[in-house]
Image (tube, rainbow, N blue to C red):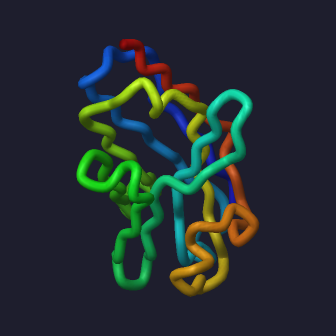
């Protein structure tokens, strides 16, 4: 499975951006897809995840109510709609996929994901 994230850019605080993640290869093996982010000098952190079997969605507390994860199987893409952006959302955003049926507690762990995209930079200016 290959993943490619795109859609990052520079936006003013309060603005919106939509990230996309295109999947190719053996996509039928994917059970979960997610977004993680890494700010300068910080560890990579979980943002959101979506299960393919149930379409259930999970979010980090820091983005609940502002970000929405979705997917379109027809075009093999996953999205992250980011609204009400804050300067603290500035980071490189990575999309990831797992070929395992992850339990809820594992969704938040980067080590549970098998495939990663290259990352796209989001900069929120105040």
Query: For this view, does 46 lie left or right of residue 25?
Result: left
Task: Report x, y in % for residue 97.
Answer: 61, 63
77 up-or-down from 14: above or below: below
45 up-or-down from 81: above or below: below
69 up-or-down from 41: above or below: below
Total number of numbered labels? 0
Location of residue 110 (image quadrant): bottom right
Q: If the image is split into quadrants, where does the N terminus sit?
A: bottom right
Task: Report the front residue among 75 and 82.
Answer: 82
Task: Report x, y in % for residue 8.
Answer: 48, 26
Task: Report x, y in % for residue 81.
Answer: 31, 43
Query: For this view, does 84 lie left or right of residue 39?
Result: left
Q: If the image is split into quadrants, where does the C terminus sit?
A: top left
Location of residue 12 (image quadrant): top left
Which residue: 62% across, 77% down?
106
54 up-or-down from 11: above or below: below
Location of residue 39 (image quadrant): top right
Task: Report the front residue among 110 and 5.
Answer: 110
Which residue: 56% across, 72% down?
107
Which residue: 35% across, 76% down?
56
Task: Report x, y in % for residue 109.
Answer: 66, 67
């Amino acid at each position: 499975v290959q993943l490619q994230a795109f859609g990052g850019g520079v936006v003013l605080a309060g603005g919106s951006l939509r990230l996309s993640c295109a999947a190719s290869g053996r996509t039928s093996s994917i059970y979960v897809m997610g977004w993680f982010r890494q700010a300068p000098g910080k560890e990579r952190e979980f943002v959101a995840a979506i299960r393919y079997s149930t379409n259930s969605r999970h979010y980090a507390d820091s983005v609940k109510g502002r970000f929405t994860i979705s997917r379109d199987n027809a075009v093999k893409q996953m999205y992250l709609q980011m609204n009400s952006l804050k300067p603290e959302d500035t980071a490189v955003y990575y999309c990831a996929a797992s070929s395992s049926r992850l339990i809820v507690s594992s969704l938040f762990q980067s080590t549970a994901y098998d495939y990663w995209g290259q990352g796209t930079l989001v900069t929120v200016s105040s």
